[in-house]
């Protein structure tokens, strides 16, 4: 299922439309989140209602619980949740209205964001790349300007990543373990598999840089699961290359 989602965003409200399905949603532009854990607690409810509901459970509103306004140039903390807010509204508007919803395969986004030109370049790129990488964006239009990394390139990178970061290293490990018939052979199998993983990460980094624009490649490298072996190896390789 491919859909078009139109979003009009001001400091006061968020309006979401899916014209293909004749769906419309208008909500106050309010987020409620935990500033310590960066966890989104509420979206699109009036601040007074959130405060009332919270005070019914707590004696006071804890200091780490904050209110924010999404998609605003001067609220970077709340802006961390922009992609999550969009994902929430798409789910609320589309999936909740369909008796048997077909999963969304691609989305053509059309945004009107009044403060977008005042965002930092880093934030604009992260926002666009989050939509492309995690929210199935095929095309993105923001204030009349198209922002696009071709979807075939993004899909190619994901296939390459799956092969070189997951399938090949696990395949090598499985094959060598099956062939091992001693403790020494088993240790050797893990050593060779570890070296294979290291080499495959290097190949993936090289191919990603050939497939995707530099800034998008960097976004992909930084988006690896924190603390994972793949992230640690990638950080090491990239830092070594920067030193050169």
Image (tube, rainbow, N blue to C red):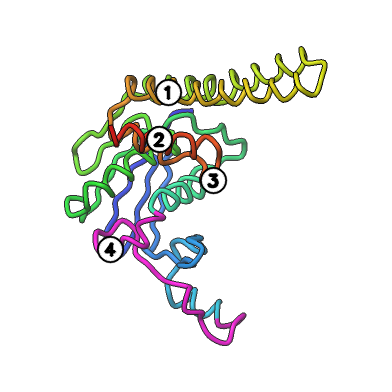
Label 3 or label 4, whichever lies nearer to me, is 3
* Residue that carries the numbered disc 1 in the rendered image: 157
Question: Label 2, label 4: how many angstroms apart (C-alpha)?
Answer: 30 Å
| First of labels 3, 2 by sequence position | 2
Which label belongs to residue 227?
Answer: 3
Stretch of the chain drawn in magenta = 55-81
Residue found at x 32% / y 40%: 128
Disc 3 from disc 2: Cα separation: 15 Å
State the residue lying farthest toward the front.
Answer: 184
* Residue at figure coordinates x 30%, y 28% from the top left: 149
Q: Give 94 or 196, whichever is nearer the viewer.
A: 196
Q: Secondary structure at mark 3?
A: loop
Q: CA distance from mark 2 to mark 1?
A: 10 Å
Side of 1 where 8 appears, left or right: left
Give the distance between the C-alpha atoms of the residues marked 3 and 4, in whole angstroms: 36 Å
Residue that label 4 marks: 11
């Amino acid at each position: 299922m491919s859909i078009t989602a139109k979003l009009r965003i001001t400091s006061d409200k968020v309006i979401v439309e899916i014209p293909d399905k004749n769906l419309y949603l208008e909500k106050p532009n309010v987020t409620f989140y935990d500033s310590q854990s960066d966890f989104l607690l509420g979206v699109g409810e009036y601040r007074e209602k959130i405060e009332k509901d919270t005070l019914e459970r707590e004696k006071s509103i804890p200091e780490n619980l904050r209110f924010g306004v999404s998609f605003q140039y001067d609220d970077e903390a709340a802006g961390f949740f922009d992609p999550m807010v969009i994902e929430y509204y798409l789910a609320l508007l589309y999936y909740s209205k369909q008796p048997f919803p077909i999963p969304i395969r691609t989305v053509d986004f059309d945004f009107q964001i009044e403060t977008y030109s005042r965002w930092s370049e880093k934030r604009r790129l992260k926002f666009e790349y989050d939509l492309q990488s995690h929210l199935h964006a095929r095309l993105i239009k923001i204030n009349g300007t198209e922002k696009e990394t071709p979807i075939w390139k993004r899909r190619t990178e994901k296939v390459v990543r799956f092969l070189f970061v997951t399938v090949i290293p696990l395949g090598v490990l499985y094959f060598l373990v099956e062939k091992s018939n001693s403790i020494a052979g088993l240790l050797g199998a893990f050593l060779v598999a570890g070296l294979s993983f290291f080499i495959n990460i290097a190949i993936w980094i090289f191919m990603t840089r050939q497939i995707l624009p530099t800034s998008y490649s960097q976004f992909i490298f930084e988006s690896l699961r924190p603390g994972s072996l793949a992230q640690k190896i990638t950080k090491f390789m990239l830092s070594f290359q920067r030193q050169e």
